[in-house]
Amino acid sequence: MKIGNLGEFGFIDTIKKKFADIDSGLSTGIGDDCAVININDNEDLLISTDLLIEDVHFLKNDIGPERLGYKSLAVNISDIAAMGGTPLYSFLSIAFNKNTDTEFLEGFMEGYHKLSKLFNTQLMGGDTTESLKHLAINVCITGKCAKGKAILRSGAKPGDTIFVTGTLGDSACGLKLILNNLRDSKDFDYLTSKHYCPMPRVEQARFLADTGAVNSMADISDGIASDLLHILEQSNVAAQVNIDLLPLSKSFKKTVNIYGFDSLQLALSGGEDYELIFTADSSKAERLQQIFNQKFGLGITQIGIIVKGEPRIEWFGSGKKIYYNTKGFNHFK
Ligand code: ADP
Ligand code: MG
């Protein structure tokens, strides 16, 4: 069988099964945004890693060095946020070919440093090697949270309200403008900045975790069609989502109208929003929304509910059930 048939998540499943015979003690491994490793009676250590490959994850010349450095760390910090944790340290491994300009690497480290400083995460090590062709970047991030308090994907309960932070689809819409060379678009700068410089929602996620009302959470890296499904699979529940409630920015709405982009595809499966999707006790949902929206210059929006059933998403729009066959981003598929 070719990996194209198995897909990214099929492959990860086979890895998880193979290693099920090794005891991981009190720690939780494959399946969440971070591994949660119990280190002492007060705290858990969070660890995650992400690999970025030139021409698969980024166009080197278009993103440019500083934004690439920034984004390489941002997508990792976002996984710490997804657990309600605080980022601690990062490790950076990088492979580049020998024609790479030193200015590019300086710019890369400048962007990486800028975000490290913002979140007070020190770079503690890594590896540097030659690549024969493409630039490859791997970041490993560590973080912490109070013992047993990480918000897992597996905690969603029937009756929970499903929320997302911010708006959906801006990043994918920005990428579409870049790929179609629609640089004259009025919203080009806004949408591409959402694509190139996502802001990890660390403070917001910690606030949400501290309320005690949030039962499950993930960051939106592949689009909610995929990231919500991961929550459902880990929690063994189903979801009903109303597409009329999806939070879309003015820039997004304007741009998809002008160019005739598929707005649902971008908002549900485009990915790389690096917002949070989470489920919370519905009796606390209204209050949570009020407090959050007052506290942060970023809203949270209720988009649906968790229900009993096999892990799948039922989509609704204009009061009717709709059949929208959309999946989030999946490498190899
Ligand atoms: P995220 O999008 O939050 O970075 P992924 O969808 O990439 O998470 O991965 C899903 C889960 O599978 C994570 O828990 C991740 O650690 C795990 N995983 C992915 N690839 C591998 C691998 N090659 N070996 C072991 N675990 C993996
Ligand atoms: Mg994630």
Image: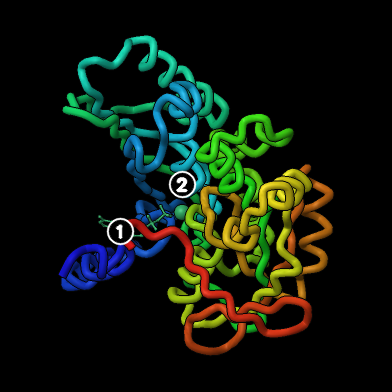
Classify residue 247 as left or right of residue 70: right
Q: Secondary structure at mark 2?
A: strand
Determine whether 121 is above or below 258 in the image.
Answer: above
Q: Secondary structure at mark 1?
A: loop
Point 52% across, 43% down: residue: 86
Amino acid type, label 2:
Lys
Q: Where residue 27 appears, x then y in whole percent?
A: 33, 62
Quarter of the figure that contains the N terminus:
bottom left
| Disc nearer the start of the sequence (1/2) | 2
Q: Where residue 270 appears, x then y in whole percent?
A: 53, 55
Amino acid type, label 1:
Phe
Classify residue 63 as left or right of residue 31: right
Q: What is the number of the mark on residue 144?
A: 2
The mark tally for this picture is 2
Classify residue 158 as left or right of residue 179: right
Instruction: Name the one closer to the observer, 265 or 95.
Output: 265
Q: What is the number of the mark on residue 332?
A: 1
Point 56% across, 78% down: residue: 313
Is there any visible trace of residue 153 in the rendered image? no
Colour scheme in use: rainbow
Instruction: Name the one closer to the observer, 151 or 49.
Output: 49
Point 20% across, 17% down: residue: 98
Residue count near mark 2 (Cα–Cα under 10 Å), binned few <14, some 14–19, many ≥20? many
Quarter of the image for residue 216 reads: bottom right
Q: What is the number of the mark on residue 173?
A: none
Which residue occupies the extreme bottom position in the image?
309
Point 44% across, 27% down: residue: 69
Residue count near mark 1 (Cα–Cα under 10 Å), binned few <14, some 14–19, many ≥20? few
Q: Where residue 230 appears, x then y in whole percent?
A: 46, 69
Instruction: Name the one closer to the observer, 231 or 205.
Output: 231
